[in-house]
Image (cartoon, helix red, strand yellow):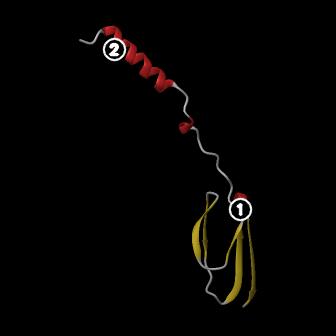
């Protein structure tokens, strides 16, 4: 027969294991994505910002997405 003392000892050991710190619960560090350039029709997200880039191919156009929602657009050809 299992004694009350043995059950208490097993319970205490289990509680200690559950209370021990674990690296698995740490939040991962977010790393900002590097800038990149779009030249074709695309939709997606960049660093948490939604984008929808569209071109009909009639001119040369490029949209560069940077950190913090920054962007730049260049085009040439049809005006």
Q: Is residue 64 above or below residue 4?
A: below
Instruction: Name the residue carrying label 2.
Output: 7
Q: Is residue 19 left or right of residue 2?
A: right
User: How far across and how far down the image is residue 34, in percent?
Assistant: 71, 62
- The correct choice, above or below, for 3 with respect to 18 in the image is above
Which residue is the extreme one toward the left?
1
Q: How many marks are shown on the rendered structure?
A: 2
Find residue 46 and report its image quarter. bottom right
Give the camera-side residue of 59 and 19: 19
Q: Nearer the viewer, residue 68 or 6?
A: 6
Q: Residue at x 38, y 17 (%)?
A: 10
Q: Secondary structure at mark 1?
A: loop
State which quarter of the image contains the C terminus: bottom right
Q: Please state, as top left, top right, bottom left or bottom right, where the N terminus lies in the image.
A: top left
User: For this rendering, which residue is in front, 79 or 24?
Assistant: 24
For image coordinates 34% across by 12% down, the residue present is: 6
The residue at 59%/78% (across/down) is 41
- Mark 2: few, some, or many residues within 10 Å (few <14, many ≥20)? few
The residues bearing labels 1 and 2 have C-alpha atoms spaced at a distance of 56 Å
Q: For residue 73, what is the image quadrant?
A: bottom right
Res. 62 image quadrant: bottom right
Towards the viewer: 46 or 4? 4
Element type at mark 2:
helix
Label ID, residue 51: none
Q: List the residue tagged with mark 1.
A: 34
Residue 74 in picture, x, y percent from top left: 76, 78
Q: Is residue 23 above or below residue 62?
A: above
Location of residue 33 in the rendering, given as x and y in whole percent from the top left corner: 68, 59
């Amino acid at each position: 027969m299992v004694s009350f003392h043995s059950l208490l000892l097993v319970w205490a050991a289990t509680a200690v294991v559950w209370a021990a710190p674990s690296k698995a619960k740490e939040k991962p560090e977010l790393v900002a994505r590097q800038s990149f350039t779009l030249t074709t029709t695309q939709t997606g997200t960049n660093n948490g910002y939604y984008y929808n880039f569209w071109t009909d191919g009639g001119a040369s156009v490029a949209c560069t997405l940077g950190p913090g929602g920054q962007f730049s657009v260049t085009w040439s050809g049809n005006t």
